[in-house]
Structure formats: structure tokens, C-alpha cells
Image: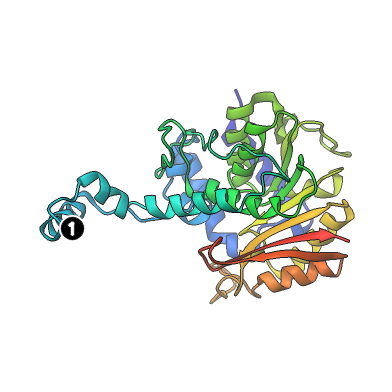
Amino acid sequence: MTDWTGLTKQLLEGVRDCDAVYRPTNFWTPGLRDILADLEQRGMEGFKSWPTAGYWFYPSYHTPLPPRTFEKTFKLALKENPDLSKFSWIRTTNGFHEARRDFDAARLTWDQSRWPFDLEGFGESAVGQPPRHYALTDEDSVRWGKPYLNYLLCLAALSRHVDEPPRHFLEIGGGFGVLGEILMRRDEQARYVNLDIPPLLTVSSFYLTTLFGDRVRIPDALDVAGPLDPPASGCLPNWRLPDVRGPFDVFVNSFSFQEMEPHVVDHYVGMVADLGVTHVVSLNSREGKRRATSDTEGGVLDPVTSDRIVEMFGERGYTVSGRYGRPLIYSAGELVVLKRT
């Protein structure tokens, strides 16, 4: 059994020793501290319900109403509509309809002729104790959360631009590893490599090894130095990116580049391009994250927008295949698919 706290401490030592471009940027200063506290105090088993999760890596569609407030609002609604059921009122107030909207958008957008993909038979695991886990079809045992559906929308857009089903995926800043779950559940030959900073690297390592066992390599099973060409999937420290070998069909970045500084993003973009990745999927803010009010309390120093990311990839020979906002993406983010020319 892996000592997750010990692994995190080992990885934090690696952060101190690595090149500065791979260290957490200003935005992540408070997040790093708070997530580490949750890991130490609460353990891994309920990481999706940690107090820090909702802001840093497990967003939800709706902030739940306290029980007393829910009862009061239901009684008021019942006066206006005596036929209203409590079940339907729960769905109105817990984010169910927003989740179903995104699921329907993914199903409508997905090009099954280019990339056959079972959208209804697989959902998000209950590992990690998700606080919002929606049954969106007639099969109650298959459920979805917002992070899962965010990535499903990304892949739905990508499906419209691929010539054949992609199998090899690279991600930087993959949160708890849900993209790997989506891909590896459906395809035993899929390869997913996620590079991230601790402690989120610990979280994704825990999640994916719980689901897939030795199909996933994690940091304590990696060589200290040298090229990394794992035939299996893996969760790796971000500073090992120079050692990673391809090929990769797709690079994905979802709401991660926007939290970094421009020179850091440009460095990563150059490394991804050098790997010869064919397609890029970016879901990041149109406006960028908020600016820091000081250099120590979070926020970014210089916002990275979706346009800046597109420009950086454009300088490395990538052109835009498609740009998506509403009705596919209901957020401040813009979903962009690029292809190497």
C-alpha cells in the first residue's frame, strides 16, 4: 500500500530542487498550503469532498442549500404549485438540470462517425466521495459530476476534428485525473500521461491507481533520472516533462494554463510542440484569472487568456480547428481545438 503522505513529502522535496519554471506560480500559493492541510488532516478517501476541493480541483454546478433553507423554499414553491414534488424541487436546486444540459450538449456534439465512443455506459467513479454525483440516464448506477462532464465536452469538440480515434493523451495540470478515467474506462489500449505539481499529483496518483491498478505508473515507481517512455499510463511530476517521450495524439489543458504566468505557459507550449503532439485541446478563460493584489496571496501576476494560449501554439505551427463557447461551454472559458500543420 502506498504511503500517500510520504509520497507527497518526497515530491515536495523535488519541487524545491527542480528548475524554477516548474514550481507552483503565485496563483497556487494558498492552494498548495490548503490542500496539503486537507490531505494531512482528512486522508485520501474523501478527497472530492475536502473543503478545498470545490475551489481548487472539484467544482460543482450548485452550492447546496442548508436543509432548513431548502425546506422553507420548497414550502413557498408548493404554495404556488401544489402539484410540485419534493424530488423535482431537489433537482431544481442541486444542479441536476445544469449537469443534464452539459451531458446532452456532449451527446449532441460528439461525432460518432469519426470517433465511436460510449457516452452513456460509463460515468464517474464514486471513489473520493463526490458531493454532487448525478444520474442522468435511466441507469441509476452510472453517474456524472461536473469535472467529468467538463472533460466530456472537451472531447466532444475534439471528436469533430480527428480523422481516427486518438489513443495517446498528454495533460498538464490534470487535477484528480478524471480525463484518464474517461479514456481508460473505454479503451484498454488508451495511454494517458498527466504531469502536475504536488499535492494534486498525489491525488491523481491515488485516484487512477485505485481505479486501474498497475496500468498507471506513479512517482514512487519511476526511475530517478532518464527518459520516460512508459507503455502504460502515468502520473508524473511536472518537472519530468523534458524526460517524457511520445508519441502523443492529443495534448489537453483544462483551466490550468490560466492559473500560470505567461513565461511558464510558453515554456510548456514549446515542450508540447517539441513532442510532436497532433491535436491540442485548450479550455481556459477568455479574460484570464484575476490579478494578484500582492505577490504572496494568490492570483496571477499577468493573466493568460485563451487568445494568448492560441498565439503561443500558433508560433509553433498549430492552427485553430474550432473555437467553442455557448451553447457547448457555459462558463467564462473558451474551448479551442488546434492541429499541428
Q: Residue at x 81, y 59 (%)?
A: 339
On the picture, is 302 further left or further right than 78? Answer: right
Per the image, the residue denoted by label 1 is 73
Q: List the single residue furthest toward the front.
A: 113
**Residue furthest top as drawn:** 1
Q: Measured from the top left, where is residue 123 in percent x and y?
A: 52, 37
Q: Where 326 falls versus 210 (above or below)? A: below
Compared to residue 311, the image places residue 77 above or below, namely: above
Q: Is residue 341 left or right of residue 152?
A: right
Question: In the image, residue 67 lies at what x, y percent?
Answer: 21, 49
Residue 120, position in %: x, y? 53, 37
Quick check: can you spot residue 199? Answer: no
Q: Is residue 295 left or right of residue 232?
A: left
**Along the viewing direction, whichever of 256 and 30 lies nearer the viewer:** 256
Measuring 24% from the left and 52% from the top, which residue is drawn there? 66
Q: Residues within 10 Å of mark 1 (few under 14, many from 20)?
A: few
Q: Give the amino acid type for the residue marked by disc 1 in the picture.
A: Thr
Residue 88 in view, yes or no: yes
- Residue toward you, 61 or 109: 109
Judging depth in this view, the residue of 163 and 173 nearest the camera is 163
Q: Please give left or right for residue 119 compared with residue 221 in the image.
A: left
For this rendering, which residue is in front, 242 or 190?
A: 190
Rendered image coloring scheme: rainbow
Which quadrant of the figure contains the C terminus? bottom right
Quarter-wise, where is residue 25 in the image?
bottom right
Position of residue 99 measured from the top left corner of the image (x, y, whole percent): 44, 51
Q: Residue at x 70, y 73 (%)?
A: 307
Q: Secondary structure at mark 1?
A: helix
What residue do we see at 71% from left, 49% from top?
171
